Image (cartoon, rainbow, N blue to C red):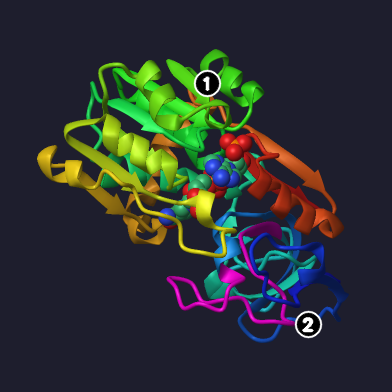
Amino acid sequence: SREWHLVARPHGWPKPEDFALREAAVAEPGEGQILVRNIHMSVDPYMRGRMNDVRSYVPPFELDEPMQGGAVGEVVASRSDAFRPGDHVLHSLGWREYALVGAEHAVKVDPELAPLSTYLGVLGMPGLTAYAGLLEVASFKEGDAVFVSGAAGAVGLQVGQIARLKGASRVIGSAGTDEKVKALTEEYGFDAAFNYKKGPVAQQLKEAAPEGIDVYFDNVGGEHLEAAIGALKLHGRATLCGAIAGYNETEPQPGPRNMISIIGKRLRLQGMIVRDHQALQPQFVEEVGGWVRSGELKYRETVVNGVENAVDAFLGMLRGENTGKMIVTF
Ligand code: NDP
């Protein structure tokens, strides 16, 4: 079985030499364990943080150990009453072809209900992030004008569509290519979108939302956050979900220069971590699952094939090569 190890902690942008694909023996499951053949694995922005030796809300990856992350696979051997060979499970030991998983850390998923990869995307962690981040953290209400950055990514594409389905007055997105921008308005129902690489964010946001915004869903940080603070109306709310513009920077990024307007406009900016919102999971699966089945909410995946290409997929995602969820299929 091949597995990806982190062999050096990246400084700035990760390099292919920071990773190694190594052979490991496939062990038999012990009592209470299952052996899973992984089929799809996720590459996510937060994994960049786990490559640093910094204490955070998830511990750092260990050097010369397999990396971890969301994966779905098929049970091939089981010493747990909860699972049988042939079952499909979601678990957190990705970055490897075979995973020995404690049964208590695996969740059964049904390929008849939805394609297996969707449990890593639209019906999985990024989907719940979008749902909880918009509805719970930003206290979205009907009639709000919503701006989301990283809008053509896994979380962003879903934030914009949930806002529209829940009655937003205007949905605006930003993304890094003209093709993505076009897809946002033509395929995913955004009212306006712009390419943040083509001009100052503040100016483009003003053109897209001349009357301002009520909610900002931040996936990017930096210049986007400053522009959004400028565009938020009185009592506006922002969910600080991610700050990908800074993940590969070696120095802390300058903060928004307009923080003082948070006071005058009584803004609320709130950070979130998705695992605090597990209680919403059943409601999320029911509502979003319904929209996906009816076609009201469209999702997209960018699929890279082969475990040997997982690092390229991860780096590609950081560079913006994905539209929707980036998935590695073995
Ligand atoms: P995406 O599918 O959105 O992939 C990342 C995208 O980020 C790329 O496609 C790229 O698109 C964009 N990007 C990269 N660099 C920059 C930059 N300098 N400025 C602006 N955009 C950039 O990933 P996810 O949907 O999985 O995650 C989106 C955000 O949500 C991330 O910040 C992530 O950390 C965060 N997150 C937070 C969670 C939480 O619990 N707080 C849970 C899950 C995700 P483009 O072509 O548009 O540049």
Judging by the rendered image, the residue that carries numbered circle 1 is 188
Residue 209 image offset from top left, x and y in percent? 34, 19
Mark 1 is on which residue type? Answer: Tyr
Question: Most prominent secondary structure in the magenta stretch?
Answer: loop
> Is residue 189 within the magenta segment?
no
Task: Identify which residue, 246 or 297, lies in the foreground.
Answer: 246
* Magenta region includes residue 63: yes
Q: Which residues are magenta?
A: 50-73
Q: Residues within 10 Å of mark 1 (few under 14, many from 20)?
A: some
SS for tag 2?
Answer: loop
Q: In terms of depth relative to the viewer, which is nearer, 297 or 302?
A: 302
Of 206 and 271, the residue lying toward us: 206
The numbered disc on residue 28 is 2
What residue is at 29 percent from the left and 42 percent from the top? Answer: 238
Binning the other alpha carbons within 10 Å of mark 2 as few (below 14), some (14 to 19) or many (20 upward) gives few
CA–CA distance between discs 2 and 1?
A: 46 Å
Q: Quadrant of the N terminus?
A: bottom right
Q: Amino acid at mark 2?
A: Glu
Give the quarter of the image for residue 191. top left
What residue is rendered at 46% in x and 36% in y?
149
